[in-house]
């Protein structure tokens, strides 16, 4: 759902707030795709939702890489 709200798929209106909410839930449930996507939100920040935070971005990319998500492993490199 985070992806749907991020990109306006499946009839969902694009909403950074909803996207981040779903990605955060998935990330805390150890979903590497959600962790990697959440890292992207922290890398850029989202006005009135989350501040840009390099430390948080790194944390979530590292968590995804530890689960062998290839894109996250590449990003860590």
Image: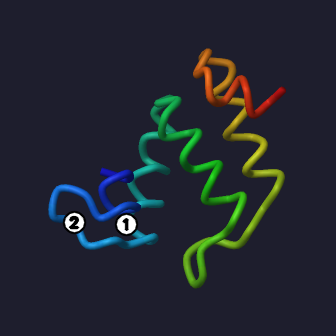
Q: Secondary structure at mark 1?
A: helix
Asked if 19 appears above or below 48 in the picture, the reply is above
Name which quarter of the figure residue 11 lies in.
bottom left
Whether residue 70 sits left or right of residue 57 in the image: it is left
Residue 61 placement (x, y as % from top left): 69, 37
Residue 73 placement (x, y as % from top left): 71, 23
Whether residue 67 sits left or right of residue 31 in the image: it is right
- Dot 2 and dot 1 residues touching (CB under 8 Å): yes
Foreground of the two, 75 or 1: 75
Residue 57 placement (x, y as % from top left): 73, 49
Circle on res. 18: 1
Q: CA distance from mark 2 to mark 1?
A: 10 Å
Residue 47 placement (x, y as % from top left): 60, 82
Instruction: Tell how many labels.
Output: 2
Which residue lies under the disc numbered 2? 12
In the rendered image, which quarter contains the C terminus? top right
Foreground of the two, 21 or 70: 70
């Amino acid at each position: 759902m985070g992806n749907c709200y991020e990109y306006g798929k499946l009839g969902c209106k694009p909403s950074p707030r909803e996207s981040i909410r779903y990605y955060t839930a998935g990330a805390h449930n150890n979903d590497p795709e959600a962790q990697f996507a959440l890292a992207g939100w922290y890398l850029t920040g989202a006005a009135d939702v989350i501040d840009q935070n390099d430390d948080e971005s790194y944390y979530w990319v590292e968590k995804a890489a530890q689960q062998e998500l290839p894109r996250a492993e590449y990003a860590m490199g």
